[in-house]
Amino acid sequence: MAVILNLETATKNCSVSVAEDGVTLSIKEYAGEGYAHAEKLHVFIEEVLAGAAKSFNDIDAVAVSMGPGSYTGLRIGVSAAKGLCYALNIPLIAIDTLELIARQAAVKEGVVIPMIDARRMEVYNAVFSPDFIKVRETKAEVIMPDSFAEFNAPVHLCGDGAEKCREVLGDSGKFVYHSDIIYPSASQMGLLSFHKYKISDTVDVAYFEPYYLKDFIINK
């Protein structure tokens, strides 16, 4: 039996779940216009543990969304995860944020491209097969009319960066826009974190850093 606390803070969605052997027992999430992760994350942790009838001492591991995504959001989630792992002396598991978005799209053919808005016409994205094997690595990409030309239809686009691509990529029929799939969620983390836990696929609590993809830049 493995009880894992899952934290997802890479985007506007502050999402926390508790899963036992891959089955989600309790989840709490909020996606507001402003980033309220610092205020809500620890409250959500206490609430999902109570909802699952678990205590901190019952947790066998903490899983955290590793990015890409919001610099501040990732720092908040990873800092909380590291603090819990240190205090409880339990392992830390890192989960690909884009895969969490991709897994919400149940498709049978083509490719799935989860996207996180990176401002203007740039998105963070990766390309997955229908069984969620990554076929192109994560990168920051400015969307152009010929983007994803190497992939055959259907090309499924999802995430909060997908809809703005419609004005560039168009409605030719090649692209399928999943406008209902916007943010990564801890609801998708249970099975992934449990699988990684079983094979001891963990990260070093002291040295792990989120996958920012780009350097943090402060604009005046």
Image (spheres, grey):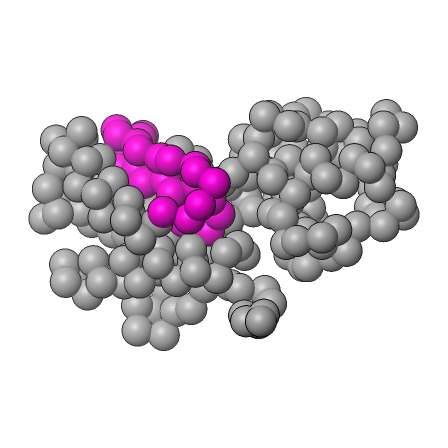
Which residue is nearer to you in this view: 35 or 51?
35
Which residue is nearer to you in this view: 89 or 73?
73
The residue positioned 44% from the left and 45% from the top of the image is 34
Displayed quadrant of residue 2: top left
Residue 78 visible somewhere in the drawing: yes
Against 216, residue 88 (above or below) is: above
Against 136, residue 18 (above or below) is: above
The residue positioned 36% from the left and 40% from the top of the image is 15
Q: Which residues are magenta?
A: 8-36
The quarter of the image holding the C terminus is: bottom right
The residue positioned 56% from the left and 35% from the top of the image is 182
Left or right, 99 with respect to 27, comes to right
Q: Measured from the top left, where is residue 173 in percent x and y? A: 86, 25
Q: Main secondary structure of the magenta part?
A: strand
Residue 28 included in the magenta stretch of the image: yes
Q: Measured from the top left, where is residue 71 in percent x and y? A: 48, 62
